[in-house]
Amino acid sequence: KEAEAAGLHCVLATGRVAANVKEIYGPLGLKSPCICSGGAQVVDGNFNMIHTCYIPNEIVKEVLNFAKEKDVHVQIFQDENFYFEKYSKWVDIYNEISGLNPVETPNLHEIPVEELNTPKVLILAEPERVLEVQAEAIERFPMLNIGRSRPTFLEMNNPEGNKGNALKALEKMLGLKREELIAIGDNQIDESMIIYAGLGVAIGNALDEIKEVSDYIAPDNDHEGVAHVIEKFMLGREPKVF
């Protein structure tokens, strides 16, 4: 809030879909745009959609069939709903953090292709299984951007719908320069924006591969890494020690 009051932009960039983020954005008191769905959606401060980059419906159909072959839980998203074929523990796990409406849809892979409009496809499984499925998915779908947002979450997006490209779109919309951008992240879906930003920051608990492409390593989540970056690089003062 202090940074925005000083005329700076604090943009939340998340893998969550826009309808999910709206619930938490208001209490944060932010007015800047928000990057959602790993970069496939960008909304303004009033949550009007200003940029989208969805997966082609034909590819969504192929991914759903792939998930069925691999016997893993898969979800697609539309508005405030997420759709899945068969109830499992993953529905409860995702529902607890998302606030979206779960919709059980038998034969999800048989939905007419023209109705499969989704910003992303999400596969949920145990961490070891996610790594296995990710390796196969990367080979099967070279046309998609595939990465983990959590150890148990495998996200699939249109390759143009990543956080880096969303940040680039916001750069133009807000009249900023690349060297004025700071991106903070910890996981695979953050890599593109960390590389694109003038200053790419990994927090202390980030994956090693994210730290390797970052310009600066901030404290971890338990020690207010994001606040550290805002104070040091945006407000220009000595960060508090938490």
Image: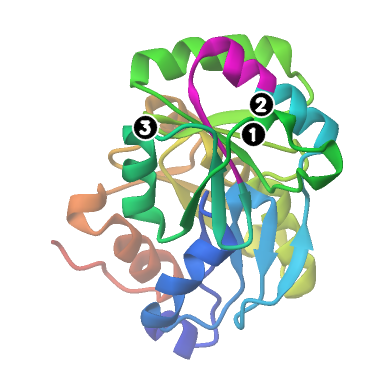
Image location (x, y in percent) of residue 231: 34, 70
For the residues labelled 2 and 1, the Cα–Cα distance comes to 8 Å
Image location (x, y in percent) of residue 235: 40, 76
Which residue in the structure is indicated by mark 3?
88
86 up-or-down from 8: above or below: above
63 or 170: nearer the viewer: 63
112 up-or-down from 51: above or below: above
Image location (x, y in percent) of residue 22: 50, 72
Tell me which label, 3 or 2, sits earlier in the chain: 2
Instruction: Name the mark nearer the viewer: 2 or 1.
Output: 1
Tell me the amino acid under the disc marked 1.
Leu
Which residue in the structure is indicated by mark 1?
108
Tell me which label, 3 or 1, sits earlier in the chain: 3
Question: Start and end of the magenta stretch?
Answer: 65-76
For the residues labelled 3 and 1, the Cα–Cα distance comes to 15 Å
Badge 1 marks a residue whose secondary structure is helix
Instruction: Name the mark nearer the viewer: 3 or 2.
Output: 3
Q: Quadrant of residue 205?
A: top left
Residue under the image location 66 percent in, 70 percent down: 43
